[in-house]
């Protein structure tokens, strides 16, 4: 392996590891205030929303542009997931709908 | 000590992630090869960095002959969002040994975090479960990367609905999180604010900021509800 790539990978590895590790290392040893615990309970919803929604409204260049292919695929997956809480089934359905729409859009 | 039953259970829970990681990892491998990386280098990056968005950005920057330092800085900012996920997971591993915690945190990704949080009773004080979930996910990511770098495009990652696989996973995981009416409000607020933040701010600050803002609003809603009672 080239030295420059090795340095790059080790550097990227280190700066990625620290924010993954430090909160876990410290917060597992501290007493967490009730209010903070309550806030952390909303982190999954907040982060998942921030991952799911912008994809539907931004193009690959990062500019605002409605993505009909994603949007039309997301709606049935949303409704289906609401009824059937199965990760597998949602992933398969999403892929099929997206694939199928590809023939029309 | 590793609890093999929990490990196996976690590994099974990772299978929907595997379905998404294999083709996306493969796409990474193909691009890495095009940017001049060897399969060993691409695989090492997936082993030691293991963070999709920053790996793709690194490849793009390498192909523009940008040196390692700006790439590392960009990686740091992209992956800062893990602070929030690591904090959230910490509630379930009170007082566990640092060695265990470092193993768990080094493999933390958006996908494994979201699957882990879909049923917290499975992960609370069950490090082997989370380890199995995360190990299986990372193996798929490494296998995909090395496979893509070695053999090139086995399948077209833009075909068969593959671009929507992980999005579908995230949608279902988000829906699973909605258990009460105020969860729905937080989702709507987070959805709108993430779009606004992404619109006005560079990079992916929007994830971290949405996390902080929306959980703050969650606290406010919950406190207001408590006062009413």
Image (spheres, rainbow, N blue to C red):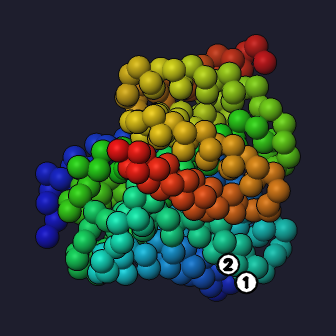
Query: Is any part of residue B28 visible from this angle?
Result: yes
The residue at which mark 2 appears reads as B72
Quadrant of the rendered structure where residue B159 is?
top right
Q: Residue B69 carries which label?
A: 1
Chain of the residue that carries numbered disc 1 in the rendered image: B
Mark number displayed over residue B134: none
Q: How crowded is mark 2: few (under 14 residues within 10 Å), some or many (20 or more)?
A: many
Q: Nearer the viewer, residue A53 or B66?
A: A53
Residue sitting at x 82%, y 56%: B200
Question: Residue furthest toward the top?
Answer: A104
Quadrant position of residue B15: top left
Q: Residue at the far front: name it.
A: B228
Q: Residue A37 sits in which quadrant?
A: bottom left
- Left or right placement of residue B162 versus residue B86 in this view: right
Q: Is residue B136 left or right of residue A7?
A: left
Q: Is residue B68 above or below residue B9?
A: below
In space, the residues marked 1 and 2 are separated at their CA atoms by: 5 Å
Q: Where is residue B39 in the image (x, y as percent from the top left)?
A: 58, 63
> Label 1 neighbourhood size at 10 Å, few (<14), some (14-19), many (20+)?
few
Tags 1 and 2 touching, CB below 8 Å: yes
Element on which disc 1 rests: helix
What percent of the width, then of the height, locates residue A78? Answer: 53, 26
Decide: is A55 above or below B6: above
Residue A16 picture location, percent across and down:
55, 73
Quarter of the N terminus of chain A within the rendering: bottom right
Q: Give the quadrant of the C terminus of chain A.
A: top right
Q: Element under label 2?
A: helix
Front residue (pair B127, B119): B119
Q: Can residue B52 be seen from the camera position used here?
A: no
Q: Which residue is drawn at 76% across and 25% down?
A: A68
Query: The disc numbered 2 marks a residue on which chain?
Result: B
Residue at 22% across / 77% down in the picture?
A: B95
């Amino acid at each position: 392996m080239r030295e420059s790539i090795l340095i790059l990978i080790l550097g990227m590895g280190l700066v990625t590891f620290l924010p993954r590790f430090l909160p876990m290392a410290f917060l597992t040893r501290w007493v967490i205030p009730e209010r903070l615990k309550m806030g952390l309970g909303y982190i999954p919803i907040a982060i998942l929303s921030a991952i799911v929604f912008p994809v539907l409204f931004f193009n690959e260049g990062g500019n605002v542009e409605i993505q009909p292919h994603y949007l039309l695929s997301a709606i049935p997956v949303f409704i289906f997931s609401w009824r059937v809480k199965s990760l597998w089934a949602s992933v398969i359905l999403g892929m099929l709908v997206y694939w199928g729409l590809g023939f029309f859009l | 000590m590793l609890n093999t039953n929990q490990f196996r259970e976690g590994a099974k829970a990772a299978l929907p992630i595997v379905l998404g990681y294999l083709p996306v990892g493969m796409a990474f491998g193909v691009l890495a090869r095009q940017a001049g990386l060897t399969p060993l280098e691409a695989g090492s990056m997936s082993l030691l960095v293991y963070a999709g968005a920053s790996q793709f950005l690194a490849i793009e920057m390498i192909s523009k002959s940008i040196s390692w330092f700006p790439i590392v800085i960009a990686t740091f900012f992209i992956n800062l969002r893990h602070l929030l996920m690591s904090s959230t997971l910490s509630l379930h591993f009170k007082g566990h040994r640092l060695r265990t915690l470092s193993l768990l945190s080094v493999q933390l990704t958006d996908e494994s975090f979201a699957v882990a949080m879909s049923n917290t009773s499975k992960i609370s004080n069950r490090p082997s479960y989370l380890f199995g979930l995360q190990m299986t996910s990372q193996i798929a990511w490494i296998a995909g990367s090395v496979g893509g770098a070695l053999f090139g495009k086995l399948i077209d990652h833009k075909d068969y609905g593959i671009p929507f696989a992980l999005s579908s996973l995230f949608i279902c995981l988000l829906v699973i999180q909605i258990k009460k009416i105020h969860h729905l409000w937080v989702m709507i607020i987070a959805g709108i604010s993430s779009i606004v933040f992404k619109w006005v701010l560079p990079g992916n600050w929007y994830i971290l900021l949405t996390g902080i803002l929306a959980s703050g609003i969650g606290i406010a809603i919950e406190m207001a509800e408590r006062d009413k009672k």
